[in-house]
Each structure stands twice: as structure tokens, then as C-alpha cells.
Image (tube, rainbow, N blue to C red):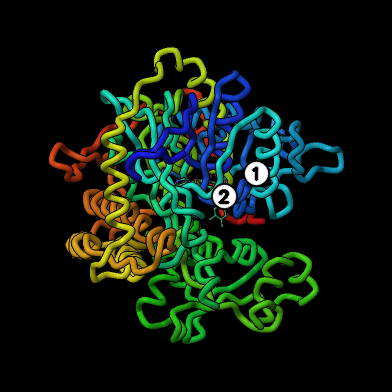
């Protein structure tokens, strides 16, 4: 509530634990805290139940062995580390693989409508690069089903929630994070929160790319920027997964996923010269090679002038029977029919799209703690589990596994985090700065700068990177940052332009960390491909971390990867991994 004094004096809303982010990760952490009797408040930018998680379609991994009884947690862990090219945090991978089965059965017990086998067991399907059928699903709406279940459970255990809140700053007292500032996106009203601990569960950073598979106002890197500004460490930011096939039109569908299943069902990729170009790029695996290989092939065809005039390659499944296509790919059939494209008769235009950022805030996977006291992170905001490339189905598992662990740990640690007075002066200064930004009379339009940033990151830190390109990109980013110092926000508060200005601020930090990490990593590994260093280098089996130095500049360093536990190493040596030929 705003009090009667100066407009930048805002009365704080108090809670024990403040969770910034209402996707699966934030909700699962909140549920655990509430069950332990902790007062918890969850904030989200959208309506309750609508977070990016609802877009997850394919499924969630756990080695339940319902269809393939030989599956074990060690093999799930080995697949995860293999696909992550050995730079995952082995502790995090072990926890994920060991605990995913219990978390998924719990979701089922809470009413999540997973698809079942005829025996009433959770059904499981193949997903790329997994040795067994391990991916549980609820039709092709798994994320939505999980979110619905978590929202109901959160209500049942008394989690408090606030919609349409944009958190713009974390507040610290005596080196410890104990609050946050922001505003109500409907009224523009400033908001101040006081807490004993703050959890960042605010999603990822793929929206820094021109084409991405999430909604454009999500995954802006808010979590990374908020954490970075208070001294937390970011890790693995250079690793960004590109999906080979995203739609290119209409504009509002640009980047939207065209499921891997189209290729799984026999879809072929052609360039504008009618050549089935995967014969050149991957004669053995063709269209079913790993995501990063196919994404690079599509990208290179388009870049080298063999794409369509509007920048796509062609994905064609029309050689298959129309009835079969409608039966096996009903959603894709509908998605394209709505755009006037009948995929039973004609090809789809597709181009790679940024899909998942493996990097994020460095955390201790056993607690969710960051390098800053009182600050925790979970879900797509945190780094460690996925290494250089993510296994499909692992990120939903990550949200519930680590959400529970974080909640459980934090409930027990709150005695060490007694309430501390908020730094009201810092909050006042921040609100004054927000006010100045919101009435900006500068030259630059925030949305135009975002568009420029997205083009820049796509061109210089995209699917294929070079040292020269990255250096040029970093220099141009500096120019963008300067221009972002003089923004024009002509509309009255609250305005979309103001939100864009704040999104831009976060995106600048995320983009810099991606570009600087990509420049530092002089090798190719997983989703990170350097044309000037095309091979994976043993000496680079390490993580790149970054944080703000005392002068506020970003500095980077490397750390060795932890040792792989013996049980997982054994499974790696047994080499279960399957080809990419079982896509559903
Ligand atoms: C198209 C698509 C399909 C996918 N399919 C799968 C799949 O099949 N299986 C799988 O495992 N993974 C999949 N993923 C990935 C998976 O969906 C995500 O990694 C996961 O849902 C992230 O959950 P989260 O809780 O960490 O964050 P999110 O669900 O992104 O939630 C972030 C929350 O933070 C809030 N927030 C952000 N910034 C702020 C701020 N400044 N102030 C206040 N609130 C803020 C948002 O409003 C939101 O509530 C897919 C991703 C995409 C794009």
C-alpha cells in the first residue's frame, strides 16, 4: 500500500519467502514451503496458472521403467550427461535422475491427468537421445496439465499469489537479499516486498534471439539480470539450444515449434534447389540426427542462399498418406491448416528457433542457494543440470525435483534468516529511477532497440558463431546499451513501452553474458558451435562463470566440472545410448 508520504515511499508487503515466478518451479517450491507451515507469496507477470510452463508439450522424464523395465536412474543420468557433453553438474544430474520418479508419481497422486497404459500405469514414450521410453506425458499438453495440478495444490495448501507483478529489483540489507521492488502491471502502482529469503523462478533467456519458441514477453532473462545485479554468479550462458524447425509465418507464429515428430514420421528437408540436403550434412542419420546437427544444417542452407526468399527451408511429409498424417500429426495438420497450408499436399516452411537456455544462475543443487545470502534460484532460471545441451523432457522434471528440494531446504533454514529491516533508501532511489525511466523523453524506442538486440544476438551469437562475429556483436551491444540510456516513453503509465524498456534492460545483461561466454569458449560443444574452433576440446571440459566486478563490469572465469559419480560412470561406460531414430 502506498502511504501518505512521498510517492516513492511505499509500505512493504511482508512474507517469509517471496517467490518471483509462478511456473512449475516456483509453484513446486511454494507448495513445499507452505506444507512446512511457511508463509509464502508467489509473484507472476501473468494470470495465475499462465506461465511459460503451459507451453511445454512433449513430456517429462523419469526412469519409471513402465514400458522398458531395464531403465534405471543411472542410465537416465548417463543419457543426461552424454547429451550435455560432460559439462553438467554431476550432483544435479544425480539428484534429477534419482528423484524424478517420485516427483512424477506425486503429481499423478495430486490428480495430474497423465496418459496411461492399458494397465493403468503412466505411459512413457521415446524422446530424442534417450536409451529407453522414459518420457511421461499428458497427450501433447503436458505442461498445461502439470501447471493445473500445481495451481490446485498450491491453493489447497494456502500459497498466496499475486498476478500481474513485474519485479524490477532485489533489495539487500547487510549483504543479504531480503526483499524486492516492482510494480503492478495493470495500475502502474509501485510495490515493495519484504521477506526473509527470495527465490528466483522467473524462467530463461531465449527471447534475446530474433526467433524463439516461447512468447516474446517471456524468457527475457529477468532472473539472470536481477541476480547478477545483486552479485550472484551466472554459469554456462553460452549454451543455447536451437530447435531445427520453427514456423516462419505469420508474424505472430514466427518461431513456433514444428514438432520433431514430423521428421520422426518421415518428413524430409529440402532446400530451394529441391535438394534433400541432409544427404550432404549427415548421410547416415539424415533428418533424424541430433537437434543441433539438423539446426546447423538448416541454418547453413538458408545462410548460403539455398533457402526460400523469405528465409526458410522446406519440410515435406506430403509423400505419406493423407490419412496417416492426420492421424499421427493432428496438431501440426491443424496448426498449418489454420494458415492455409495443407501439409498432406505441400511442404512447410521452417527455420531454426531458439528453444532453451541451458545456462542461468549458479546454484547449489542440494539447496537452491546462490552465491548471495538469502537468494535462491530454481527451474529454467538456474544452471547446472543440462550442461551443453538439454535432453527433451528434462526441464519439466527439473522444475518439480528442484522445486521440492529448495522448498524443503529453505523451510529448515529460515531460522538462520531472521527478518531484517528493508533498505528503504535503496527502494526509494529505485522507484525514483523507475519514474525517470517511465517518463523518458530520449530518442530511442524500446521495442526498436529490442528488435535490434534480437537481430544482433541471432546473427552474432546464434547457431553458428565465430570469434570475429562475437567481438563485433559485443561492440554493437555496447552501442545499444548506450542508446538504451535515452529511451522515449511517450505513453502514460502503465505502458507497454515501459515494460519493454525493462525487458530490454534484462536482455542486455543476458545477451552480454551469452556473447562473452561464447567468445571465451574456444571450442564447439553441444549446442555451442564455433566455426573457427569446430572440434570439442578436452581442455574445455569446464564451466564458464561470470559476475559483476566492483566497477560493475562483467568478468568471466572458468571452473572444472565435478567428478561423475561411479554409478553413473558405469552406466556411461555401458553405453546404452540410442540413435535418434525413435521420435514421437
Ligand atoms: C514450446 C516449448 C515446449 C517445451 N516442451 C517441453 C517439454 O515437452 N518437456 C520439458 O521438459 N520441457 C519443455 N520445455 C521447457 C519447459 O517448458 C521450461 O523449461 C519450464 O516450463 C520452465 O519452468 P519455470 O517454472 O522454470 O519457468 P516459467 O514457466 O517460464 O515461469 C516463469 C515465471 O516467472 C514469472 N516472471 C518472469 N520474470 C518476472 C519478473 N520480472 N517479475 C515477476 N515475475 C516474473 C513469469 O510470469 C512466470 O510466472 C518447452 C519449452 C518450450 C518453449
Can residue 578 be seen in the rendering of this structure? no
Give the numbered dot on residue 174. Answer: none
313, above or below 12, in the image? below
Residue 488 percent coordinates (x, y): 29, 67
Left or right? Give the position of 516 relative to 125: left
Left or right? Give the position of 157 relative to 201: right
Q: Quadrant of residue 191?
A: top left
The local crowd at label 1, few if under 14, some if 14 to 19, many if 20 or more residues have their Cα within 10 Å, is many
Q: Is the CB–ligand 1 distance for label 1 below 8 Å?
A: yes
Q: Nearer the viewer, residue 273 or 156?
A: 156
Left or right? Give the position of 129 relative to 414: right
Q: Residue at x 37, y 25 (%)?
A: 374
The local crowd at label 2, few if under 14, some if 14 to 19, many if 20 or more residues have their Cα within 10 Å, is many
Residue, far top: 415
Residue 462 percent coordinates (x, y): 35, 62
Q: Residue at x 39, y 32 (%)?
A: 179
User: Could you give the CA–CA distance between mark 1 and mark 2, rounded to whole angstroms?
Assistant: 8 Å
Quarter of the figure with the C terminus: bottom right
320, above or below 144, in the image? below
Q: Which residue matches tag 1?
A: 147
Q: Nearer the viewer, residue 480 or 485?
A: 485
N-terminal label among 1 and 2: 2
Residue 495 percent coordinates (x, y): 43, 62
Q: Quadrant of residue 330?
A: bottom right
Residue 323 percent coordinates (x, y): 80, 74
Under tag 1, what secondary structure?
helix
Q: Which residue matches tag 2?
A: 51
Can residue 479 be seen in the rendering of this structure? yes
343, above or below 204, in the image? below
Q: Nearer the viewer, residue 386 or 48?
A: 48
Q: Is the CB–ligand 1 distance for label 2 below 8 Å?
A: yes
Do the CB atoms of the residues marked 1 and 2 lie less than 8 Å apart? yes
Amino acid at each position: 500500500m502506498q502511504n501518505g508520504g512521498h510517492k516513492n515511499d511505499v509500505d512493504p508487503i511482508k512474507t517469509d519467502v517471496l517467490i518471483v515466478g509462478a511456473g512449475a518451479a516456483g509453484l513446486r517450491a511454494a507448495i513445499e514451503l507452505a506444507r512446512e507451515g511457511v508463509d509464502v507469496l508467489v509473484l507472476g507477470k501473468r494470470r495465475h496458472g499462465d506461465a511459460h510452463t503451459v507451453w511445454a508439450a512433449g513430456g517429462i522424464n523419469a526412469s519409471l521403467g513402465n514400458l522398458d523395465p531395464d531403465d534405471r536412474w543411472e542410465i537416465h543420468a548417463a543419457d543426461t550427461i552424454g547429451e550435455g557433453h560432460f559439462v553438467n553438474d554431476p550432483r544435479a544430474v544425480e539428484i534429477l535422475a534419482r528423484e524424478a520418479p517420485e516427483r512424477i508419481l506425486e503429481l499423478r497422486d495430486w490428480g495430474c491427468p497423465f496418459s496411461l497404459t492399458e494397465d493403468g500405469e503412466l505411459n512413457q514414450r521415446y524422446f530424442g537421445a534417450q536409451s529407453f521410453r522414459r518420457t511421461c506425458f499428458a497427450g501433447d499438453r503436458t505442461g498445461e496439465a502439470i501447471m493445473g495440478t500445481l495451481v490446485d495444490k498450491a491453493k489447497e495448501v494456502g500459497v498466496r499469489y499475486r498476478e500481474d507483478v513485474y519485479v524490477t529489483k532485489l533489495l539487500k540489507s547487510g549483504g543479504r537479499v531480503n526483499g524486492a521492488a516492482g510494480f503492478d502491471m495493470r495500475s502502474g502502482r509501485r510495490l515493495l516486498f519484504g521477506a526473509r529469503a527470495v527465490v528466483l523462478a522467473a524462467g530463461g533467456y531465449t527471447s534475446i534471439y530474433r526467433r524463439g519458441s516461447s512468447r516474446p514477453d517471456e524468457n527475457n532473462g529477468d532472473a539472470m539480470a536481477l541476480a547478477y545485479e545483486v552479485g550472484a554468479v551466472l554459469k554456462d550462458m553460452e549454451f543455447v539450444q536451437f530447435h531445427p524447425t520453427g514456423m516462419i509465418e505469420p508474424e505472430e507464429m514466427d518461431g513456433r515449434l514444428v514438432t520433431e515428430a514430423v521428421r520422426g514420421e518421415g518428413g524430409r528437408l529440402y532446400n530451394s534447389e529441391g535438394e534433400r540436403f541432409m544427404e550432404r550434412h549427415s548421410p547416415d542419420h539424415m533428418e533424424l540426427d541430433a537437434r543441433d546437427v539438423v539446426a546447423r544444417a538448416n541454418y547453413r542452407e538458408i545462410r548460403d542462399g539455398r533457402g526460400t526468399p523469405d528465409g526458410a527451408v522446406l519440410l515435406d511429409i506430403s509423400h505419406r498418406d493423407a490419412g496417416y498424417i492426420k492421424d499421427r500429426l493432428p496438431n501440426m495438420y491443424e496448426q498449418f491448416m489454420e494458415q492455409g497450408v495443407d501439409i498432406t499436399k505441400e511442404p512447410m516452411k521452417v527455420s531454426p528457433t531458439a528453444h532453451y537456455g541451458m545456462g542461468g544462475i549458479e546454484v547449489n543443487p542440494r539447496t537452491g542457494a546462490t552465491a548471495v545470502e538469502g537468494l535462491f534460484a530454481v527451474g529454467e532460471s538456474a544452471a547446472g543440470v543440462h550442461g551443453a545441451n538439454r535432453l527433451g523432457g528434462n526441464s519439466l522434471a527439473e522444475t518439480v525435483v528442484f522445486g521440492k528440494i529448495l522448498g524443503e531446504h529453505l523451510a529448515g533454514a529460515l531460522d538462520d534468516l531472521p527478518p531484517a529491516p528493508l533498505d528503504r533508501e535503496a527502494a526509494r532511489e529505485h522507484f525514483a529511477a523507475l519514474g525517470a525511466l517511465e517518463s523518458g523523453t530520449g530518442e530511442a524506442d524500446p521495442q526498436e532497440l529490442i528488435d535490434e538486440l534480437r537481430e544482433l544476438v541471432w546473427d552474432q551469437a546464434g547457431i553458428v558463431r565465430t570469434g570475429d562475429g562475437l567481438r563485433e556483436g559485443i561492440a554493437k551491444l555496447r552501442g545499444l546499451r548506450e542508446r538504451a540510456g535515452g529511451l522515449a516513453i511517450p505513453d502514460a503509465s502503465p505502458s507497454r513501452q515501459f515494460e519493454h524498456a525493462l525487458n530490454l534492460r534484462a536482455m542486455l545483461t543476458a545477451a552480454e553474458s551469452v556473447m562473452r561466454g561464447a567468445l571465451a569458449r574456444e571450442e564447439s560443444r553441444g549446442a555451442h558451435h564455433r566455426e573457427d574452433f569446430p572440434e570439442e576440446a578436452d581442455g574445455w571440459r569446464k564451466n564458464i562463470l561470470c559476475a559483476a566486478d566492483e566497477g560493475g563490469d562483467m568478468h568471466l572465469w572458468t571452473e572444472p566440472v565435478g567428478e561423475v559419480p561411479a554409478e553413473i560412470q558405469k552406466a556411461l561406460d555401458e553405453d546404452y545410448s540410442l540413435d535418434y531414430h525413435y521420435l514421437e
